[in-house]
Amino acid sequence: MASHSNFETIEKQKRIKEESEEDDEETEQDWDDWREDDEEGSESGFLCLFCDAKYSSCDELFEHCRSSHHFDFHSIRTALSLDFYGSFKLINYVRSKVAEHKCWSCGFTCQSKQDLQNHLHATIDVKDIKLLCDDDRYLKPVMQDDKLLYSFGDDEGEDDYDTAFDKEELMRNLGNFEEICIDDENTGKQCASSNFSLTENGKREDASTSSVHLNVANSSEKVINNGMDLKACVGTSYMRPRDKDSRLSLVNLAAKDIKKVNDNYFSSYSSFGIHREMISDKVRTDAYRQAILENPSLLKGGLVMDVGCGTGILSLFAAKAGASRVIAVEASEKMAAVATQIAKDNGLWRNRPQSEGNDSNTGIIEVVQGMVEEVGTFIQIQPHSVDVLVSEWMGYCLLYETMLSSVLFARDQWLKPGGAILPDTATMFVAGFGKGGTSLPFWEDVYGFNMSCVGRELVQDAAKIPIVDVVDDRDLVTNAAVLKNFDLATMEPEEVDFTASVELEPASVCSTSNSMELKSTTTWCHGVVLWFETGFTSRFCKEKPVVLSTSPYTAKTHWAQTIFAFQEPIAIGSGNSNPSTAVGTDASPVKRMHLRISVARATEHRSIDISLETSGYAADGRKRSWPVQIFNLS
């Protein structure tokens, strides 16, 4: 028994040794691969920020920039106390300006790259540069595989690095690499469930917006996200990646996360059930059908691009309306094949020519499988050659799925100057809803039994997560207000993220569905509901302008409305106020409700974050503010 045990021990040790040797070989191979990659990268060198010169080290490059182009990277970095992320932004800022033939210092636009190099001069006040380059858009590399972005700090000592450590700056910027989530035992333990980074003032810094953040109006107020007081999380220790490979891995991780989300997103549209629901939505489909078929002068003989074609229903409408060619773009591999087959079955399929100049096909619809950002790699199409750009891009709360960014890309890349975009406007609305807009009435009487405890729990959950559901217009207890207008023909991509303020007032008691509330001038507002309209306006649809509405006042659609419940209901009304009672109670109802709503693309690709700040004013002028609520629609 003992000898057998010793034999097993010897065999086990032998296996461990063999495995260890294999691991060492694999590790050595990994290091060899790394060294090879590094050597290959060094051959390409570091590209100058201003000209085509390349250098084998960052120091040589920056010395060249200083002596030849009046750009002293190290001096500027020191003067502005830039950390890694600030320096990262500075490099991308300069590259972006050079690409536009603009002076990074004064903003003067030159005629050519050579003219720009002749114009370059030393900056007058270096502090002005920080305001220009301190924009989250410059966290996205301007140049693909820009080695300089991950190497400029290699000469820093560890002590110097720690000295430059700025906790508040780091907390602002860790969330600013799109789609990056760092899993570290020292990172975000207390805020593990939060999708946001917060400054010490309680401000939520969004990961993907360049000019708009989900702001908290008053640092003394609580910030509520999924029932958690996020201000308590501000003291969490966040650690910055210390070496080149860690920083590079973050960017690679971001790209992989985006690809994964995109794959899941597009594969979800491979379900025929989703397409049946959308096509069966009469409000939706009829609006597009009317806009396309009843404006014959718009599409006849034109080149049309359909972004996110799905089954190809809008492309079929366009072909029927007289378009000479329709490029139907669909990222889902399955649905692209389906759209192709449908075009064939209807005698409208346009086969791609096998050779340039050989376009004898008489078909109309050409299906391109891929993202619209990649269309140019799949087919021959001239920039700014599309006459009409059409897309059904809207998601819940209008902006969920963030497909609008792709539509704007297609507009800027392919649409002719003055070309039509359908729809060309979008408007978001907001209104307050009462008890009837919650599940409370249902649970208060279930076959004669009181189950209101279930309703109360559901209402509490609704204050943490947005709910997509149909709200009856009779359950709205305030007026409706315009939250945001978008002009798709002219808006900039960064305008997708925004902050807007509105004021709501109690609606007439006649609009209230609860008979008990009809007898009183006071009613209870349980939250706000958002919906949208898109317009096919007379700017392009001259014969037949059309409006697609998801309003509670019109026929329901598959988008329904998006509900954001308050932490607690707020009494609203035109009655008098009792100074000894709190604003928003039955004795001191709110006469005017002020909302500040921010919508921004979230750290999770294709999701959106919504912050809701609510204040109320009583009849005697007293004001009360409620804790800020932050929602994630994903």
Image (tube, helix red, strand yellow):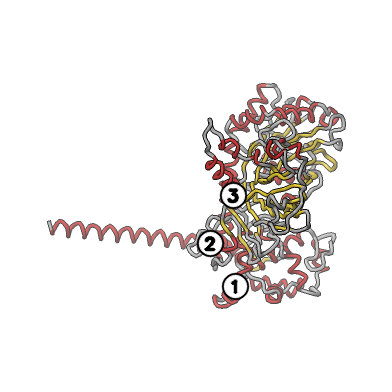
Asked if residue 64 lies left or right of residue 385, the reply is: left
Residue occupying the point 72% across, 56% down: 212
- Of circles 1 and 3, the one toward us is 3
Specify the amino acid type for callout 1: Phe
For label 2, the residue is 188
Q: Report if residue 91 is visible in the image.
A: yes
Separation of disc 2 and disc 3 at Cα? Answer: 20 Å
Instruction: Report x, y in % for residue 553.
Output: 74, 34
Please tell me whether residue 308 is drawn above or below residue 166 in the rendered image.
above
Specify the amino acid type for callout 3: Lys
- Residue found at the far top of this picture: 346
- Of circles 2 and 1, the one toward us is 2
- In terms of sequence position, does the residue under pointer 1 or pointer 3 come before the other? 1
Instruction: Report x, y in % for residue 434.
Output: 68, 42
Specify the amino acid type for callout 2: Gly
Residue occupying the point 41% across, 58% down: 26
Find residue 133 and report its image quarter. bottom right
Label total for image:
3
Crowdedness near tag 2: few (<14), some (14–19) or many (≥20) residues, C-alpha within 10 Å: many
Crowdedness near tag 1: few (<14), some (14–19) or many (≥20) residues, C-alpha within 10 Å: some
In-front residue for pair 219/206: 219
